[in-house]
Image (spheres, rainbow, N blue to C red):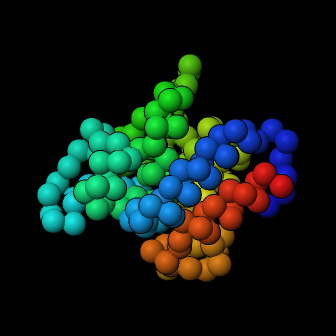
Amino acid sequence: MESNTSINQEAVRQAISIMERVNGGGYRFNMSFWSSRRTPGGRDVDIRLMDERSVHECGMAACFGGWVALSPEWKAIGGSVIITGAPVLRGTVENYYGADAIAKWLNIEPDLAELLTCTGVGVDDEGRSNFYGGKKLIQIAPSEVIDKLNSLLH
């Protein structure tokens, strides 16, 4: 990835920190969806009422954007989460959802945010991400997202 001086480096470092917690804390990670809405025991939950810790303690999974949406860093900037687990960032004129919210936060192009979050242009017809080496979404590890985020800083 090319370096971009307009990238919000502070936000990228926060995103890396979030993914490091996921990677080192045994959090369940799955790039196939924003976040699960059902516990492993089969109990339905309203993800909007949960935070990073409670989702982890329930054994639920989330993707990069899903974990961001549940993080204290995201909430500190006024971000929130919708019922699907996707991040929401409220703007002065419009609101940003999903990959667009991540793009706005990191100050990156929407297409790059889709690649990072495996949404839109980020996934082929077979459910694989060329951005992450052609892996199926469930095979992508948090450490690989960390590597991609680190490359934004260099």
Quadrant holding the N terminus:
bottom right
Residue 87 point in image, percent of width and height? 46, 43
Inspect this view and state whether residue 83 appears: no
Q: Is residue 101 visible?
A: yes
Residue 93, horizontal then vertical, whole percent: 56, 21
Compared to 97, does 146 lie above or below? Answer: below
Farthest top residue? 92
Above or below, 153 relative to 118: above
Looking at the rendering, in which quadrant would you find the C terminus? Answer: bottom right
The quarter of the picture where residue 51 lies is top left
Q: Is residue 79 above or below residue 130?
A: above
Which of the two residues, 154 or 87, is positioned nearer the viewer here? Answer: 154
> Which is more toward the observer, 9 or 122?
9
Q: Quadrant of residue 149?
A: bottom right
Q: Is residue 93 above or below residue 139?
A: above
Residue occupying image coordinates x 36% and y 62%:
61
Nearest the camera: 58 or 131?
58
Residue 118 placed where, x, y %?
A: 54, 63
**Residue 117 quadrant:** bottom right
Name the residue rendered at 67%, 46% in the picture: 12
